[in-house]
Amino acid sequence: MRLFALFSLLFLLLAAPAAADIEISAPGQQTIPLAATKLLAQGMVPAQIVDDFDQTLNDDLLLSGLFRLVAPDSFLSDARRIGLKSNQVDFGQWRLLGAEVVVKGTCRLQNGKLVVETRLFDVAHRRLLTGRRYVGSQNDVRRMAHRFADQILKSLTGTEGPFNSRIAYISNQSGHKELYLMDVDGRNGVRLTNHRSIVLNPDFSPTSKELLFTSYRAGNPDLYRKEIYSGREASLSARKGLNIAGRFRPDGREIALTLSKEGNSDLHLLGTDGSHNRQVTKHWSIDVDPSWSPAGDKLAFVSDRQGNPQIFILDIFSKQVKRLPTAGKYNATPAWSPKGDRIAFSRLEQGRFDIYTVAPDGSDERRLTFGPGNNEHPRWSPDGRFIVYSSNQSGAKAIYIMRADGSGATRISPAGGDCSHPAWSGRW
């Protein structure tokens, strides 16, 4: 995989925090009118670079559900003028168009590198909110747009966006179930394994530099660990029986997974070198699909100890186990949100799966997906704003992203093959 050589520099001092002045509502409610002007090229710059930055930034901002983009064909003369300082922007024009914030920027080629400078302005207060300068190759232009979209969300909400991250998933487009990696918008997909077998259940390390997954490459469901940048890969747990659904602890020091080396399927904790630290469940039932709480002190997991598959919460220190009090006879694949306030899961009802979220005490259950097909394997974005999942609502299984309230569902995986088991990295 090509190393991504891109750096950004905080270019100007920020003004006072904007959130107090620009009202942010929940996604899809009261949206902020935002005018995103195209980058103005300084010198000879391929038009495709400008178009790629513009399209990527706009797609990210619309997916966030926080903005309403002002129609570009209504822009006046200021959109065609370089204005990287507050006193260079004609805020009156943007106020006339109803924009509350405006994005302006430039791009140029310098010593073979692409230089992009971007700014976000508060129209009402005629001030700069944030600015960035990015330097990289021409192929990095979409990455720059993702990073500035993240910065816009941070400037207006206080929390950085998730667009400069990656999604791992499983696809059978090669004829075998292999591990793939793609951008959050589905671009730049790359295959990471060639096991010519069955690969399942990817999970990113907290640094996003490594992936865990289970593979039947050697005939047994063994746990593997792969360095994303170097491509180095090693078997981490090849104990007799199941070695499945490995999940890094949030501090990266341990891995929770299901082992059946003694016959029954229980949850265990491994060191990152594959050494066995301890067994944390011991029950006649099948215990699978662990998901760490953000503090790393609890695991949500699935067990059939009360008959049907249900979600339980284990305190790994006291080993106290409590059922997550949800409705439904079949609940599976729990995923704890980064803030710890919600658990996403899939429920089987009337022959199909749908995705729900619930508070860790079992209150405030919300159904997020409706309509045809199965919607499964939810995982959270690093900021908790979005959920990635797999669905066969249009036929073949594909990867979708939706906002945490269930709105804005968008297919992101490319056509070809069945895609499933997504996992969302931390910021890249």
Image: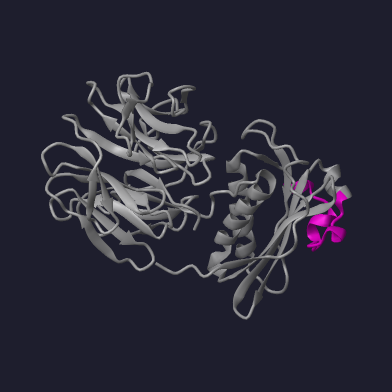
How is this picture coloured? Answer: one colour
Q: Nearer the viewer, residue 310 or 123?
A: 310
Task: Identify the residue at horizontal 64%, vertical 49% (top origin).
Answer: 154
Q: Viewer-proximal residue, 150 or 358?
A: 358
Q: Which residues are magenta?
A: 72-91
Is any part of residue 178 visible from this angle?
no
- Res 44 quadrant in image: bottom right
x then y, percent, for residue 169:
36, 49
Q: Quadrant of the N terminus?
A: bottom left
Q: In x, y percent, where is residue 82?
A: 79, 63
Tell me what residue is drawn at x 49 percent, y 47 percent: 382
Q: Dividing the picture into quarters, in which one does residue 208 lie?
A: bottom left
Residue shown at the point (62%, 58%) measured from the top left: 53
Evaluate whether residue 210 shows in this view. yes
> Residue 165, percent across and down?
49, 54
Q: Work out which residue is located at the far bottom of the displayed protein and give it.
A: 111
Q: Position of residue 101 (x, y in %)?
A: 76, 47
**Of the pair 414 and 326, the residue shown nearer to us:** 326
**Relative to 387, 259 lies left or right:** left
Residue 166: say if magenta: no
